[in-house]
Amino acid sequence: MTIPIIFDTDPGVDDAQAISLLMASPEIELVGLTTTFGNVYVETATRNALLLTELAGQDIPVAQGAAYPLVKTPFPPPAWIHGADGLGNQSLPDPTRKPEAVCAAQFIVDKTRERPGEITLVAVGPLGNLATALQLDPTIVDRVKRVVVMGGAVHTGGNVTPAAEANIFSDPHAAKRVLSAAWPMTLVGLDVTHKAVLDPARMKRIASHQGELGKVLQHSFDFYADFYEGALGIDGCCPHDSCAVAWVLKPELFKTAKGHIHVVTEGPAEGLTLMASTDRDYLDDRWTQGGIVDVCVDMDGDAMAAWMEEVLTA
């Protein structure tokens, strides 16, 4: 039995790694990719999603989604991290396929109606597509198997502000809707994703097994790793989005805690994800609104990176 997944993404170097991981895993049925603004503009995200699937020889539906945050004025994409093209600034052909006729949110609604109780949504960018799907059909919370979000930080600081992780900060109002909804949810945030490092030797071995796609992954890795060397002083990069995939397939690598997640939408703490643990009482019920989220608080980073290589070199 395979696990049906819709992958909501803004590729993005670490997104490209995660998409490759999903396509390589025999345990995954990749139902579709839905795209959003974030690491790049949404048109570039869609182009990259189509191109990555073509380079892997796979015909996977791609539906274009959110171009802007629900409320706030967007910041420009972080070209110094992912490149202007999202893949480390390389000359690549245009994809031959086109995106789906329906938007990303409608694609998510339609597929979950076709396969109630089966599909896991894995979201690794700003959460506008999931927020819009909730608005289109609030009963979707009863049809998804689980929602896995790469985003936030509950015990560590942010990576784009002292308080906020990039995906949540990019669209905090959408994140507030999604993270408080009553669907089964796991949050895979910076508390764990910074524990895994994809180093140059491992990336080289992965690239050598991935054909034309491997060349793209290697080039984008080199660009991304330059940023990480300057930002965090590490040799390689943190494969943030692949950690969300790892949770689906290798949950034993993680330690989780249960809590309600609150997202700050205004002020200096905009984008902060605040966890109210279920193992204590509070003065009033404001902290216990919305669904209960399984929050990843620890991960075996070395084992995660080794597993990632194993899948991508099989």
Image (cartoon, rainbow, N blue to C red):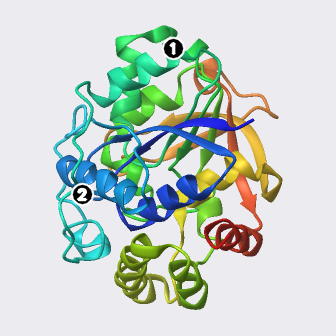
Q: Quadrant of the C terminus?
A: bottom right
Using the image as rendered, state which of residue 53 and residue 71 is in the foreground. Answer: 53
Dot 2, how many residues are within 10 Å of its Cα: few (below 14), some (14-19), or many (20+)?
many
Secondary structure under the numbered disc 1 in the rendered image: helix
The percent position of residue 36, horizontal first and vertical second, equals 30, 43
- In front: mark 2 or mark 1? 1
Answer with left or right where residue 300 lies relative to residue 199. right
The percent position of residue 301, horizontal first and vertical second, equals 71, 70
Amino acid type of the residue tagged 1 in the rendering: Glu
The quarter of the picture where residue 200 lies is bottom right
The quarter of the picture where residue 281 lies is top right
Answer with left or right where residue 152 lies relative to residue 126. right
Q: Quadrant of the N terminus?
A: top right
The percent position of residue 126, horizontal first and vertical second, equals 37, 44
Dot 1, how many residues are within 10 Å of its Cα: few (below 14), some (14-19), or many (20+)?
few
Is any part of residue 309 visible from this angle? yes
Q: Which residue is tagged 2? A: 40
Amino acid type of the residue tagged 2 in the rendering: Val
The percent position of residue 16, horizontal first and vertical second, equals 42, 62
Is any part of residue 154 visible from this angle? no
Q: Residue at x 71, y 28 (%)?
A: 282
Q: Which residue is tagged 1? A: 114
| Distance of label 2 from label 1 (alpha carbons) | 31 Å
Outermost residue, front direction?
Answer: 57
- How many numbered tags mark residues here? 2
**Which mark, residue 16?**
none
Q: Is residue 15 above or below residue 290?
A: below
